[in-house]
């Protein structure tokens, strides 16, 4: 493998989310989100960090857009903070909150940066949680109403839309394990009902985008791209990896099955194994539910960072093969597994036949400003080069991958991990809020400028 397979119109970008960078948590009439409330709980977040200020992007967005422009990043994936726009989640629109995103989009376009807007990246309105949140059957209508407000305001200039980011995480980590906002531990029956309502919310949102957008919309999802690597290249191990991703191996494993999270929205039905696994816990399904949730979309976004490896066990089921001692790991404790960007896109494309975008991929590192005033992060460069070479390989093998978004443009609030895990291409001093462009940011600029050819220069 010695040449670039990235198509000429490949979308190279960077990504961030509103709660993780914006700050201004209580600016004006903005309503509280579940993350605003969760961060107030003692010990809920490492070091009792909060997103109250974060990177202060709300007040510094012009500087931040200028940094992206200096680095020649052509595309930026951002999210809207729902209660900044609708403080109570529904009803009255907070004009000043919505105007922030209006100004942000204009600032991006003025610098020739194309926005991809994620409507929901976990900034759930606290007011709606108090009405039952995703467990409330009205939650899809709430999300559709919010979608309409944003689309009415921005779709004359924005064409690229992502409805939801990682429903697996905001439902399971937030409502089953209690590790993320809102910090609940609910029974599996409720989890499945919330997942069902989330799929309906996606479908209702897509319908609003398609019917209300003022320019032709390009619509997708951003999902946890759960991936398992085959231990060997044998057909048995490859099939074991596929089963580990999409199958149901008991109730606990099934809650992370891509079959549960993807099939309803992309195929319009649950897998047979969903019903046999959960039986009496399966939620009531309305006659039009599958038609609603399986609205046609234009692309499938996968957030992929790392993978476990599996082989076919003696019982025919996938079994985990532990990695060797001393396996490279990132600062967040995740294994460094570049082949995730080969097998992940391959398995999901084979199953769903949709163009793939890698909507998140990146490295948590322990970066710091060196004595020379710069941030040298060779590990991130090495990490990204390894992963992008695998993405190039899968494109060469015929998988339709259309874009890649590096996570993240800035060091930011890493949810329950607080500020200690730095994913950014741009360093942020969280006391002074000074931004420092890291070596990796300029390296990535060169990858973009050469459409991937620089991956083979050894630089």
Image: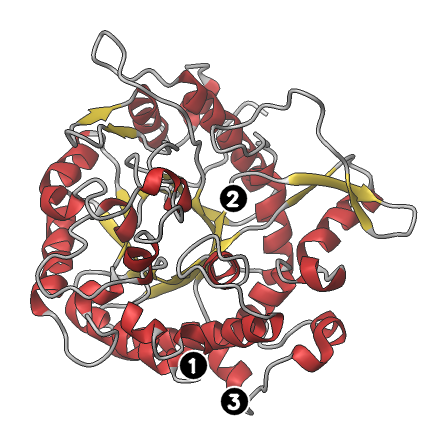
Task: Point out the image quarter for the N terminus.
Answer: top right
Residue 157, how many percent across, how many down?
Answer: 17, 61
Circle 1 Cα neighbour tier, 10 Å, few/some/many (<14 / 14–19 / ≥20): some
Q: Which residue lies furthest to the front in this view?
A: 42
Left or right of 324: which side holds 77? left
Across the whole image, how many numbered discs are drawn on residues?
3
At a point 31% along the width and 30% down the height, the residue shown is 425
Q: Residue furthest bottom?
A: 287
Q: Which of marks 3 and 1 is in front?
A: 1
At a point 31% along the width and 19% down the height, the residue shown is 368
Residue 262, how many percent across, how many down?
Answer: 57, 64
- Residue annotated with mark 1: 136
* Sequence order check, earlier mark of 3 and 1: 1
- Residue annotated with mark 3: 288
Q: What element carries label 2?
A: loop
At a point 42% along the width and 30% down the height, the residue shown is 452
Left or right of 23: which side holds 185? right
* Sequence order check, earlier mark of 3 and 2: 3
Circle 3 Cα neighbour tier, 10 Å, few/some/many (<14 / 14–19 / ≥20): few
Q: Distance between the residues labelled 3 and 2?
A: 32 Å
Comparing 133 with 157, the one in front is: 133
- Residue annotated with mark 2: 304
* Sequence order check, earlier mark of 2 and 1: 1
At a point 59% along the width and 46% down the height, the residue shown is 344
Left or right of 193: which side holds 161? left
Does 299 sit above or below residue 193?
Answer: above
Q: In which quarter of the image is residue 403?
A: top left
Q: In this view of the protein, can residue 210 be seen by the observer?
A: no
Circle 2 Cα neighbour tier, 10 Å, few/some/many (<14 / 14–19 / ≥20): many
Comparing 166 with 206, the one in front is: 166
Q: How far apart are marks 2 and 1 (CA)?
A: 30 Å
């Amino acid at each position: 493998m010695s040449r670039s397979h990235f198509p000429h119109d490949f979308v190279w970008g960077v990504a961030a989310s509103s709660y993780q960078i914006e700050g201004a948590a209580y600016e004006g009439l903005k309503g509280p989100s579940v993350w605003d409330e969760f961060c107030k709980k003692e010990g809920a977040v490492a070091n009792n960090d909060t997103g109250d200020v974060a990177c202060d992007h709300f007040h510094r967005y012009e500087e931040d857009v200028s940094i992206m422009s200096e680095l020649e990043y052509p595309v930026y994936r951002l999210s809207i903070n729902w209660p900044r726009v609708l403080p109570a989640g529904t009803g009255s629109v907070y004009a000043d909150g919505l105007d922030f995103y209006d100004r942000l989009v204009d600032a991006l376009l003025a610098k020739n940066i194309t926005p991809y807007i994620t409507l929901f990246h976990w900034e759930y309105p606290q007011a709606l949680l108090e009405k039952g949140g995703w467990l409330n059957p009205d939650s899809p209508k709430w999300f559709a109403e919010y979608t309409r407000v944003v689309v009415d305001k921005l779709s004359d200039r924005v064409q690229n839309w992502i409805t939801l980011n990682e429903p697996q995480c905001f439902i399971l980590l937030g409502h089953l394990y209690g590790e993320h906002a809102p910090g609940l531990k609910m029974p599996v029956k409720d989890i499945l009902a919330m997942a069902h309502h989330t799929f309906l919310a996606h479908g209702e949102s897509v319908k609003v985008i398609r019917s209300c957008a003022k320019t032709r919309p390009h619509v997708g999802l951003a999902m946890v791209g759960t991936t398992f690597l085959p231990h060997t290249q044998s057909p048995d191990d490859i099939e074991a990896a596929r089963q580990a991703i999409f199958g149901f191996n008991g109730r606990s494993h099934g809650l992370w099955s891509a079959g549960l999270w993807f099939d309803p929205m992309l195929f319009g039905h649950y897998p047979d194994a969903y019903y046999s696994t959960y039986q009496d816990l399966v939620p009531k399904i309305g006659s039009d539910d599958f038609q609603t949730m399986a609205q046609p979309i234009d692309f499938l976004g996968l957030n992929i960072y790392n993978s476990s490896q599996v082989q076919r066990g003696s019982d025919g089921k996938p079994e985990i093969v532990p990695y060797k001692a001393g396996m490279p790991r990132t600062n967040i404790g995740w294994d460094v597994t570049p082949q995730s960007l080969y097998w992940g896109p391959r398995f999901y494309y084979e199953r769903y036949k949709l163009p793939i975008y890698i909507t998140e991929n990146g490295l948590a590192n322990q970066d710091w400003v060196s004595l020379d005033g710069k941030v040298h992060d060779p590990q991130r460069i090495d990490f990204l080069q390894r992963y992008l070479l695998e993405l190039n390989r899968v494109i060469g093998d015929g998988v339709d991958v259309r874009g890649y978004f590096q996570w993240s443009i800035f060091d930011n609030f890493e949810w329950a991990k607080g500020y200690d895990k730095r994913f950014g291409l741009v360093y942020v001093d969280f006391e002074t809020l000074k931004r420092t462009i890291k070596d990796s940011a300029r390296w990535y600029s060169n990858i973009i400028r050469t459409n991937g050819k620089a991956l083979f220069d050894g630089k």
